[in-house]
Image (cartoon, rainbow, N blue to C red):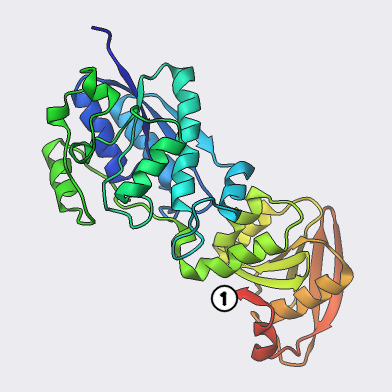
Amino acid sequence: MKKRKALALLSGGLDSTLAVKMMLDMGIDVEALNFTSPFCTCTGKNRGCKSEAMRVAEEFNIPIKVIHKGLDYLEIVRNPVHGYGKGVNPCVDCRIYLLRKAKEYMAECGADFIITGEVLGQRPMSQKRDSLRIIERESGLEGLLLRPLSAQHFDPTIPEKEGWVDRDKLLAIKGRSRKELFDLAEEIDVKNYPCPAGGCLLTELSFVPKMQDLFDHSDELDPRDFRLLKLGRHLRVGERTKVIIGRDESDNNLLENARHEGEAAITWMDGNTPIGVITGRQDQEAIQLAARLLLRYTRAEKDADCRISVRQGNTEQVVTVRNNLDEEAVKAYVISL
């Protein structure tokens, strides 16, 4: 019998790693597909979701393809067909998006079906039974989407009916408890999973104002701007202008490196200072206001006239502004503290 191949959505977290290992143990060839997002919370200095997926693929000796969620994904976040969760998380639409992309790649890589690490009832929006049915139907994968960890709770898929996988070896895990998953990891020798539950900034209520502000004040969506939402303090200084002020040296370095050509970087010249990067339209009125707001996060003397360095491209100018905005005045511009 022809050896069958599964295409796995692999985040690098525990659930998807277990699903891949189950298929490999059944003798199924597996190729992994990983999606990067500006909104993943499983990030650290050296180990984000992408690097974990790469590590798992290397450990299991399977090929992996990384796809970056682009502008088409951001438009889905802005206008989801199936609505948001508690934040601005379009979880159902997001899964449909991922699986449609996977279906396209399935034909390219020669896979026979797709597997995911989804667990019935684990996530409140996208892993309810009705939601899972909608996701399967609207992604165009009816019968070809296998969820090994919860398969016994669903009707048999084509891989099961055709005998490509042994249904008796598939599981019936459900609910939010992760104990069965941890036990399974120990049983099938899956170790070193730093991000077992995953996470998405779009589910966090504190992230909603920054997302909504960006949607409301952007002529065109730019994935870079969404990545910057994780950094610093965001203050709206004009209809199409924002200043992002670093919280620490790491923020400062990342903001500097992410700056587009022509965007101004501002610093206080006479003391320790965060960097402020002005995004959007660059006019002198906005730069002056951004400079005054920057001083609120320095130790500049109140009501003092302060010199601010403004760097744009290969040019630098010095503007002098007065440090006279009090805390209440600054709050009027703050999108996120």
Quarter-of-image position of residue 7: top left
Residue nearest the viewer, comparing 194 with 239: 239
Residue 327 vertical placement versus 35 (above, below): below
Locate the C terminus by quadrant.
bottom right
Res 327 seen here? yes
For image coordinates 55% across by 42% down, the residue present is: 69
Residue 118 vertical placement versus 329 (above, below): above
Q: Position of residue 92 (x, y in %)?
A: 44, 49
Which kind of residue does numbered mark 1 sit on? Leu
* Extreme residue toward the top, this view: 1
For image coordinates 33% across by 58% down, the residue present is: 124
Residue 43 lies left or right of residue 260; in this view the side is left
Residue 317 lies left or right of residue 54; in this view the side is right
Residue nearest the viewer, comparing 323 with 72: 72
The residue pinned by badge 1 equals: 337
For image coordinates 35% across by 44% down, the residue present is: 132
Residue 175 vertical placement versus 150 (above, below): below
